Amino acid sequence: MLTTPVLALLGIGAGAAILLAVASRLLRVEENPTIELIAEALPGANCGGCGFAGCEAYAAAVVTNEDIPANLCSVGGAEVAARVGELSGKVAAAGEPLVAFRRCSRVEGKVQPRFSYVGTQTCASAAMLEGGPFMCSWACLGLGDCVRICPFDAMYIADGMVEIIASKCMSCGQCVKVCPRGITQLIPRRARVMIHCSTREKLKSVSDVCEVGCINCLKCLKACPAEAVGYEKGRVEINHEVCLAYGSVCAEACVGACLRGIMHRHAPAPALAPVSIDPSEPDAPIDCELYPESPDSVPCESVAPNARPASDLPAPEFTPLVSPSGKTSAPPLAESMAGEDGRKEAEQ
Amino acid sequence: MEESQVMHYFLMFIGAVFVNNIVLAQFLGQCPYIGCSKEKTVAIGMGAAVCFVCVLSTALTWLVQKLMLDPLGLGYLQTIVFILLIAALVQFVEMFLKKIIPPLYKSLGIFLPLITTNCCVLGLAILVQREEFGLGTAVFYSFSASAGFMLALILMAGIRERLALCRTPRALQGIPLGLIMAGLMSLCFMAFKGMIS
C-alpha cells in the first residue's frame, strides 16, 4: 500500500538524478581551469578598478587576451599581480601604489555659495545647474557621489567636503570616474608634491571666489628643474613619475615658486592597512538601507577642516552615507536623500 | 468553429494577463516582483526567464500528472513531485543552454537558479491541473500567465526607476514604497474584474 507512492517518488528522483548526471557529462562546457584559479587569486571585491566588469571578467580577459597585463588589480597590489602573472604566464611589473586625493580646498578658500541647492542630493545633478551651488565652478560639491561608489568605505563627508582615508584606499579609481568635476585623482602614495586645487579658470576669476585657488600663473612649471609639472586641459598636472625619479635635489622648487600656497609638500600617504575583503567579517559595513544613518551625526566641529587622517592617528569618527556593500544593486539614489535635511542644516 | 477557437484563446490570454494577473490578482511570485524590479533591463530578463521555465515546466508536469500520478492514484503527491520535477528541469535547462545556446544562457543564466523555487512556476503547474486543461491549452495558459507576470514586473520597474529620483519620506524608502505600490497596482488591476466573464 505504501510501496507505490514510495517507489513512484524514488523513481522520479532517481530518474532526475540520472538525467542530470548524464547531462552534466554530455553538456559539459570546457572552461579554461586557469581562469578559475586566477579568479580565486583575485581579491573578489568586484570593484571594477581594473576596467573589467568584475574579478571573473578580468580573470577571463587576462587569460584569453595577450595584451591584458597581469598587474591591473590595484586592490591586490604587487602580491596578487605576481600570482596572476605566474598563473597566466605573464611578467607582472608591480605598479606604483596609488592613493586617491581630493584636489580642492573649498573650505580653507572660503568659497561662497552661489545659491542654495535643494534638488536631488547627488554631485552629478548639482553640478549640472549653473556651474553648481558654489561660486567656484570646480569646487568639491560635497554631496558624496564618490562616498557612495567607494567599495572600500575609504571616503566620508566632513564639513561638506569629502575626506579620503588613505589607509583604506585601494586606488580602484571608482571615485575618479564618478566625480563630475575631476577633483579626485589617483596619485602615488609617495608623491612629493601635490596641488590642492583643480580649477580650470585663470587669474582674477579664481582669486575673486577662492582664497587658495590656483590662478594658473604657471610659475611652478618654470620652477621645476625636472619639467615634471605640466599644463593639461586648463589645469596644472604633476608628472609624479618624473618628479619621483628626479628626487629631492630640487627641494620642491615648485612649492617655493607658488605665490598662493596651492602647491603643497605631500606627506607620504600611510601604507595600506591590511584589509580582508570578506563580506562576512564582523566589521562589515552596516546595511544602511535598513539603518539609514544621517550625516548630521558626523561631528563636524571635531574634524579640522583640512585634517587628513594619518595611519598612526585614529581615523576620525564618521558615518558612511551609504553602505558600499550593495554594489550590485542599482545606485542607491533614494537612500542618499535620507539625510538631506541634516546636511542642509550643517551647511547653513 | 475555427473562429470561436481563436477567440477562446484570445480571451484566455487577456484574462490571464489582465483579469487574473498572476502577481497582482493571485499574489504568486511576489519575491521576484519586489526583488527584481529595480531596473527595467533586469525586470525583462527575469520576466523572460519565468516565461521560459513556466512553459517548459507546465508541459512536463502535465505529462507526469496525466501519465503517472493519475493512473496510479497518487494525486496527493502532486506538490512534492512537481517541486522535484521543476528543480531538476531548471538544472537541466541551465546546463543545456550553457552548452547549446550560450547567448541565451548569458541573458537568462543568472535568473534561472532563482526560479527553481519560484511559487509562480509551481502555482501555474498546479493551477492548470485544477482547471483540467488539455496539454495545448495548459501550455498556452501558462505562457499567458507568465506574460502577465512579465508585464507586472516591467510596470513596477518603470515606476521604481522614476521613484528613485523623487524625494520620499525616509521611513518609506525602498521596500516599503515598493509594497505600497504593489498594493496600488493590484487595486488598479481589480478594475479589470468582470471584463471577461
Image: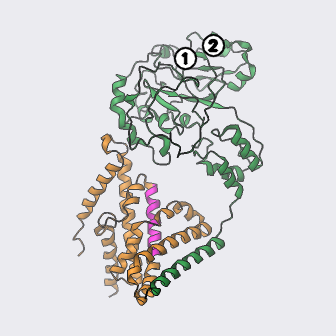
The answer to whether residue A98 is above or below residue A221 is below
Q: Amino acid at mark 1?
A: Cys
The chain drawn green is chain what?
A
Q: Considering only order in the chain, which callout, 1 or 2, is on the residue closer to the N terminus?
A: 1
Marks 2, 1: nearer the viewer: 2
Instruction: Residue A148: give x, y in percent of width and height.
Output: 47, 37
Q: Secondary structure at mark 2?
A: helix
Number of marks in the rendered image: 2
User: Residue B16 appears in which quarter of the rendering?
Assistant: bottom left
Observer-nearest of B90 and A216: B90
Residues in magenta, as a range: B41-57
Residue A302 highlighted magenta (yes or no): no
User: Which residue is farthest bottom?
Assistant: B71
Residue named by callout 1 = A214
* Residue B50 appears in the picture as rendered: yes
Q: Amino acid at mark 2?
A: Val
Observer-nearest of B181 and B154: B181
